[in-house]
């Protein structure tokens, strides 16, 4: 199984959910997780944390699946490409749900041909605006919503964890 590295960015979480995020991440990574929670200035009463991890490919999907759907939780999970496996990016907000994209070796989002064709057909039939469809494929609505929380976290501590394989 290929191993890779990634980062879990918890942008906002109420204090009552902090231990649950740690338990969920620890269950996926197979190690005890204790994050350095800091106040999130962009959302009063919320906290933020970052967790850098090393584990088998596909871990980002498992982390995103374990955390999605929790109210007032905003997060992103990235996974670097590894031998024979593309990278991934997941973003979650309570209002937009989950965004998933495949990323290349330089971190660029790679949109599959069939998704681009579907967006073009939708626009050609008058059901949607092509620019808005392409922006959605690139995750722009998620980026727009998460951007204030990203800046609020500049300078926050980061903890590295390695999965025992």
Image (cartoon, rainbow, N blue to C red):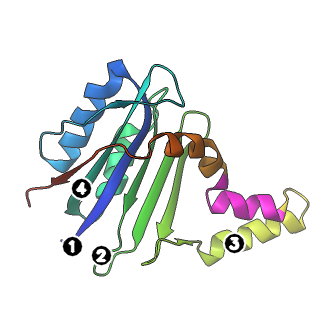
Mark found first going from the N terminus, 4 or 3: 4
Q: Examine the rendered structure and indicate whether residue 93 appears above or below residue 91.
A: above
Q: Which region of the structure is painted magenta?
A: 130-140
Which label sits on residue 76?
Answer: none
Q: Which residue is drawn at 36% across and 54% down?
A: 61
Q: How far apart are marks 1 and 4 (CA)?
A: 14 Å
Of tags 4 and 3, which is closer to the observer?
4
* Residue 8 located within the stretch drawn in magenta: no
Q: Examine the rendered structure and indicate whether residue 9 appears above or below residue 102.
A: above
Q: Distance between the residues labelled 3 and 2?
A: 25 Å
Mark found first going from the N terminus, 1 or 4: 1
Q: Do the residues labelled 1 and 2 touch (CB within 8 Å)?
A: yes
Quadrant of res 52: bottom left
Q: Mark 3 points at which residue?
A: 116
Q: Describe residue 68's horizontal placement relative to residue 136 as left or right.
A: left
Q: Position of residue 135 (x, y in %)?
A: 71, 60
Q: Name the residue under label 4.
A: 53
Under tag 1, what secondary structure?
loop
Mark found first going from the N terminus, 4 or 2: 4
Q: Find the residue positioned furthest to the front.
A: 155
Magenta span: predominant SS is helix
Q: Which of 65 and 6 is in front in this view?
A: 6
Q: How far apart are marks 1 and 3 (CA)?
A: 29 Å
């Amino acid at each position: 199984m290929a191993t890779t590295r990634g980062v879990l960015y918890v942008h906002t979480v109420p204090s009552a959910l902090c231990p649950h995020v740690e338990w969920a991440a620890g269950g996926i990574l197979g190690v005890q997780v204790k994050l350095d929670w800091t106040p999130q200035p962009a959302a009063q009463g919320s906290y933020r944390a970052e967790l850098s991890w090393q584990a088998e490919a596909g871990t980002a999907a498992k982390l995103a699946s374990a955390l999605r759907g929790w109210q007032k939780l905003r997060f992103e999970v990235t996974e670097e490409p590894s031998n024979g496996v593309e990278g991934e990016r997941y973003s979650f907000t309570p209002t937009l749900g989950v965004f998933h994209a495949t990323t290349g070796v330089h971190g660029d989002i790679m949109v599959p041909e069939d998704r681009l064709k579907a967006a073009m057909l939708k626009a050609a039939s008058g059901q949607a605006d092509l620019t808005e469809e392409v922006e959605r494929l690139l995750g722009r609505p998620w980026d727009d919503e998460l951007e204030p929380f990203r800046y609020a976290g500049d300078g926050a501590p980061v903890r590295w964890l390695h999965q025992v394989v």
